[in-house]
Image: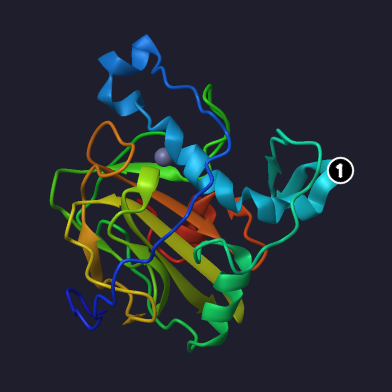
């Protein structure tokens, strides 16, 4: 797999307008302060939560079963939001599908951190609310790698609570698979929207931009429906689990 093969051009910062409608708890549990491994960046949920509007189509149930996992979608508002493909900043299902449609089937896969990392919060429910990704801890500046061949559908050098981040669309088994990485170091993003990436390509450096209390990558996976799912089964299937 091509490592450190920088093909992309930073096309510029995508001006993203997040409406972080949910006032997330601003306090960090005392226990989290003592143990770095149990910290978390609660506002990331708010960030990722923007894409939650894609879940709204499931409305009544507010419970999405996917790959054996049941995602209980919190529904803070009684009225489902319409699916909006144009205002989600490239991290929703429509953009994921469009990106996947534009690229060839991924022929290779790579761990986010080929040299290993520590894990913090996994995907799933937690005290602060549902965690839509998993937190992979590493030292400042450690390169972050794309998990598969694909095309960049979102990238920002200043993505609010997500910090410096990018999202990449892949085609795997004919299906749209998107991976999203947050909190890169300032100025370390090596790709821009439209960049074609290869599995293992360095897309940025581990940082703590946005709302993060230590260096880590908040990593999410989702598909054409925009619903986040646990990355571990996919990673295990493709031999790239952390
Ligand atoms: Zn996280």
Mark 1 is surrounded, within 10 Å at the Cα level, by few (under 14), some (14 to 19) or many (20 or more) other residues, namely: few
Question: Which color scheme is applied?
Answer: rainbow
Q: Which residue is drawn at 81% across and 36% down?
A: 78
Q: Name the residue under label 1.
A: 60
Q: Quadrant of residue 3?
A: bottom left
Compared to residue 42, the image places residue 34 above or below, namely above
Q: Is mark 1 within 8 Å of ligand 1?
A: no
Looking at this view, name the residue that lies furthest to the top. 30
From where the camera sits, is residue 92 visible? yes
> Disc count in the image?
1
Q: In the image, what residue occupies the spot 63% across and 55% down? A: 227
Q: Nearer the viewer, residue 164 or 226?
A: 164
112 left or right of 205 in image: right
- Residue at left offset 39%, top offset 54%: 241
Q: Can residue 66 be seen in this view?
A: no
Which quadrant: the N terminus? bottom left
The quadrant where residue 31 appears: top left
Q: Residue at x 45, y 81 (%)?
A: 106
Is 58 on the left or on the right of 168, as rendered? right
List x then y, in percent, for residue 90: 50, 66
Indicate whether 185 appears above or below 42. below
Vertical placement of residue 116 versus 98, above or below: above
State the SS at label 1.
Answer: helix
Is the residue 149 above or below the residue 46 in the image?
Answer: below
* Drawn side of residue 202 relative to residue 194, left or right: left
**Residue 133, x across and y down, in percent:** 48, 46
Residue 169 position in % (x across, y down): 48, 73
At which x and y percent is residue 237?
A: 50, 63
Taking the image in four quarters, ligand 1 sits in the one at top left
């Amino acid at each position: 797999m091509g490592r450190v093969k920088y093909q992309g051009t930073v096309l510029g910062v995508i001006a993203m307008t997040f409406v972080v409608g949910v006032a997330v708890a601003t306090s960090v549990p005392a226990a989290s302060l003592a143990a770095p491994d149990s910290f978390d960046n609660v506002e990331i949920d708010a960030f990722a939560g923007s894409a939650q509007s894609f879940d709204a189509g499931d409305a009544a149930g507010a419970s999405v079963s996917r790959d054996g996992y049941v995602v209980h979608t919190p529904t803070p508002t009684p009225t489902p939001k319409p699916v909006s493909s144009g205002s989600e900043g490239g991290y929703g299902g429509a953009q994921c599908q469009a990106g996947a449609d534009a690229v060839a089937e991924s022929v290779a896969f790579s761990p986010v951190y080929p040299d290993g990392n520590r894990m913090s919060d996994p995907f799933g429910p937690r005290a602060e609310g549902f965690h839509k990704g998993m937190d992979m801890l590493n030292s400042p500046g450690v390169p972050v790698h794309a998990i598969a061949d694909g095309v960049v559908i979102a990238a920002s050098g200043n993505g609010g609570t997500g910090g410096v981040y990018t999202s990449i669309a892949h085609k795997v088994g004919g299906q749209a698979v998107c991976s999203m990485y947050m909190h890169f170091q300032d100025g370390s993003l090596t790709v821009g929207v439209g960049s074609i990436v290869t599995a293992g390509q360095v897309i940025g450096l581990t940082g703590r931009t946005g709302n993060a209390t230590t260096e880590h990558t908040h990593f999410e996976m989702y598909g054409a429906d925009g619903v986040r799912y646990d990355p571990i089964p996919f990673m295990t299937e493709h031999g790239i689990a952390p």
